[in-house]
Image (cartoon, coloured by chain):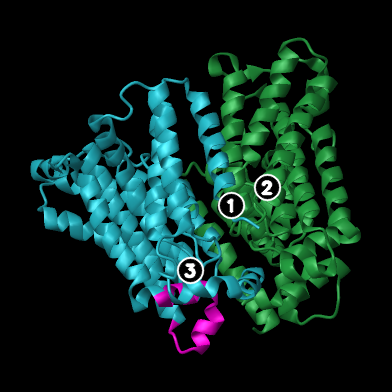
């Protein structure tokens, strides 16, 4: 089972490359191989749409999700889950759009939106780690489910007429809008910055090490003296903050703020992280694995859209391909670690 | 690993409920839940006129029925250490299929048989992914959730009315003010309590959820057992789908979205532990009633849509706070 291999992979993630068998190598780059396979399928079935323009679309669509999924990776590695990311992102986009339409300068509007997101993440953390820490396993599942409901409700309530609020602020559009070239638009660089910082925090800092320790064995981590309450609090806070950033990026992408702008993102973020090799029950995961997972989902969604598959078959195909990715990944992992 | 270790670590506390579920005469959690239900009812009865009247209570029970039945199945699955997110889709697929079959004038036993077959087949598919291919159950069932939903939409995008008069009439019967759907819930509740608390099957289920490796070493065929539990969970969802079609006279592909999360919330409020080993069907029943009461009460208060979401989230939060273990 994967469970027994957790310390090995966690150590590998923390210490970088080490001597490995071919299967272990395949295991480490399995998500990249899957991505390549998807590209080949895409190229065969829709050669006309296989253009740089489509690639730009895929990457642009992936940028908000990758930021949110990075926060989700932190949660999952720590053995928690954050189901409220979609709601918090929607609320953040709504607040930013509303304040800008009220005439607030865009940096303040964005800062306010991020502040609210962070505070909601902190509330998640306070409930999960401190108030109901002794609740029978996975308090974060229920706490963040309730937070999803609350944040979607608040976002709807502050929206006049419950309609999307268009953003006409020129400064915001240049700072968060997407240009035709990927490297020329700022959001790309925000996402890259988030990825690098998150990677360094997860692999090179005491905080990151604590997250892995708590995720792979909370009792042992507690005995060693890691602060479980504090760490879980900060992990959920980070997730809330990054959801807020994701919401702002989505607002920049669609040039509007809307409570349902990130509806269902929690599922995509979890799927992306796990396709990228993060263990669902903690102790294993990398930020760059999640990045590849997001790209896989991006190619999948865009491909199905371009091939004009009807919605019902899109659902079927997507579910099937996600399961396929996980099943194959699991088989590879078993061969790699012989358990 | 973490789940296994922590359950090992907690065994000192949990063996009581693992071996003998009747160690204490009444679970304190059940009392707490009952008190919570009464408290919420009292609050709503001040805010809404006629909230506590025979009619509205019967209506409440009718609305609880589908959630409760699905949540019973979820309880078994959670106690066995798995999670099943596909149940909401199974409910809508079965509801659509049942309605379609009644439109084509199939006899009622045929409708029930096809519903059961659908449920068992999806459960078996889930179990194959989880047990054989070792995909984590959260993700495997997330995949089947979207596949089954896609299938339901393929069968029919429009709501399908139920044409069989006998079928609809059956769900309109009520004994002593208790509507038929809830009578079914009570029967299933009895069966589920017997199965989980007073049978070898229940002990095995808790053993698999608490410590799968230990259960296997003790000679239990855990693979087969996990198959059976996942199929049972899906079968409960299929029954829920039949009841939904009978209660609302319609089968809709979009009807039961999000039901899986409500069912899991009900089970957890009722004392089941995500990660396995512990759970109570009676607790799940009360959890389902509490959740439905909150949903119905907020809808009846006539608050605008968004406030329903806020209040629902806040009330679930308060319920969690009250339910936490002391110490």
At x 62%, y 41%, the residue is A84
Examine the structure image and report whether residue B213 is included in the region drawn in magenta. Answer: yes
Label 2: which secondary element: helix
Q: Crowdedness of circle 2 by 10 Å Cα count: few (<14), some, many (20+)?
A: some
Q: Where A203 falls versus A63 (above or below)?
A: below
Which label lies toward us, 3 or 2? Answer: 2
Using the numbered discs, state the Cα–Cα distance from disc 1 to disc 2 in whole angstroms. Answer: 9 Å
Residue A69 on image: x %, y %: 70, 48
In the current view of this chain or complex, which residue is farthest to the top?
A: A103
Q: Quadrant of the C terminus of chain A?
A: bottom right
Q: Are marks 1 and 2 in contact (CB under 8 Å)?
A: yes
Instruction: Provide the chain ID for the residue under circle 3.
Output: B
Residue found at x 67% / y 39%: A61
Residue B75 circle label? none
Q: Which residue is mark 1?
A: B324
In the drawing, does residue A240 fall left or right of residue B319?
A: right
Does A162 lie within the magenta span? no
Which one is nearer the viewer's eye here, A188 or B214?
Answer: B214
Q: Which mark is residue A131?
A: 2
**Disc 3 vs disc 2: Cβ atoms closer than 8 Å?**
no
Where residue A266 sits, quadrant-wise, is: top right
Asked if residue A177 is positioned above or below residue A56 in the image, the reply reads above
| Residue beneath disc 3 | B129
Give the main secondary structure of the magenta stretch: helix
Supply the letter of whichever chain is cyan.
B
Q: Which chain is green?
A: A
């Amino acid at each position: 089972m994967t469970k027994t291999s957790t310390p090995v992979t966690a150590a590998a993630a923390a210490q970088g490359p080490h001597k490995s068998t071919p299967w272990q190598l395949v295991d480490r780059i399995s998500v990249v191989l899957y991505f390549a396979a998807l590209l080949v399928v895409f190229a065969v079935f829709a050669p006309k749409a296989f253009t740089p323009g489509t690639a730009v679309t895929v990457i642009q669509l992936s940028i908000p999700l990758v930021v949110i999924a990075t926060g989700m990776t932190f949660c999952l590695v720590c053995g928690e889950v954050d189901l409220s990311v979609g709601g918090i992102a929607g609320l953040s986009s709504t607040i930013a759009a509303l304040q800008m339409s009220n005439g607030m300068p865009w940096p303040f509007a964005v800062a306010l939106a991020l502040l609210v997101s962070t505070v909601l993440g902190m509330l998640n953390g306070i409930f999960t780690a401190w108030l109901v820490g002794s609740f029978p396993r996975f308090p974060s599942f229920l706490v963040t489910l309730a937070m999803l409901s609350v944040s979607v409700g608040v976002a709807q309530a502050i929206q006049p007429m419950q309609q999307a609020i268009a953003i006409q602020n020129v400064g915001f559009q240049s700072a968060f809008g997407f240009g035709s070239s990927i490297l020329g638009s700022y959001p790309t660089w925000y996402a890259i910055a988030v990825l690098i910082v998150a990677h360094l925090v997860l692999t090179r800092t005491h905080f990151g090490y604590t997250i892995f320790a708590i995720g792979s064995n909370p009792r042992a981590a507690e005995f060693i003296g890691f602060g479980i309450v504090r760490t879980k609090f900060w992990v959920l806070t980070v997730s809330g903050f990054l959801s807020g950033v994701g919401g702002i990026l989505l607002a920049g992408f669609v040039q509007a703020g809307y409570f349902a702008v990130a509806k269902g993102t929690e599922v995509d973020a979890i799927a992306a992280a796990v396709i990228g090799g993060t263990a669902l029950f903690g102790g294993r995961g990398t930020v760059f694995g999640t990045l590849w997972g997001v790209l896989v989902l991006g190619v999948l969604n865009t491909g199905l859209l371009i091939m004009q598959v009807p919605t019902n078959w899109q659902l079927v195909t997507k579910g099937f391909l996600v399961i396929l990715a996980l099943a194959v990944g699991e088989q590879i992992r078993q061969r790699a670690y012989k358990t | 690993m973490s789940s296994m270790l922590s359950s090992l670590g907690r065994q000192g506390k949990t063996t009581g409920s693992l071996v003998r579920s009747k160690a204490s005469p009444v679970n304190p959690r059940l009392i707490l839940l009952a008190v919570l239900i009464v408290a919420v009812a009292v609050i709503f009865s001040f805010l809404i006129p006629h909230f506590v009247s025979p009619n509205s209570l019967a209506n409440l029970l009718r609305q609880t029925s589908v959630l409760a039945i699905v949540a019973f199945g979820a309880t078994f699955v959670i106690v066995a250490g798995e999670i099943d997110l596909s149940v909401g889709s199974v409910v809508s697929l079965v509801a659509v299929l049942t309605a379609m079959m009644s439109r084509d004038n199939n006899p009622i036993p045929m409708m029930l048989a096809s519903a059961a077959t659908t449920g068992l087949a999806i459960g078996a598919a889930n179990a194959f992914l989880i047990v054989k291919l070792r995909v984590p159950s959260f993700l495997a069932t997330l995949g089947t959730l979207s596949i089954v939903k896609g299938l339901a939409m393929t069968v029919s995008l429009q709501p399908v009315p139920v044409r069989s008069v006998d079928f609809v009439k059956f769900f309109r019967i009520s004994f002593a003010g208790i509507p038929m759907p809830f009578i079914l819930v009570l029967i299933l509740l009895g069966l589920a309590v017997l199965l989980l608390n007073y049978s070898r099957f229940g002990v095995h289920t808790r053993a698999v959820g608490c410590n799968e490796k230990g259960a296997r070493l003790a000679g239990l065929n855990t693979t087969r057992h996990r198959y059976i539990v996942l199929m049972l969970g899906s079968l409960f969802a299929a029954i829920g789908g039949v009841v939904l079609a009978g209660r609302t006279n319609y089968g809709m592909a979009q009807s039961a979205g999000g039901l899986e999360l409500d069912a899991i919330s009900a089970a957890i409020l009722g004392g089941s532990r995500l990660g396995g080993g512990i759970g109570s069907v009676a607790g799940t029943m009360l959890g389902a009633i509490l959740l439905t009461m909150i949903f119905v009460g907020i809808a009846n208060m006539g608050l605008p849509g968004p406030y329903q979401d806020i209040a629902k989230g806040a009330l679930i939060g308060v319920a969690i706070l009250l339910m936490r273990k002391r110490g």
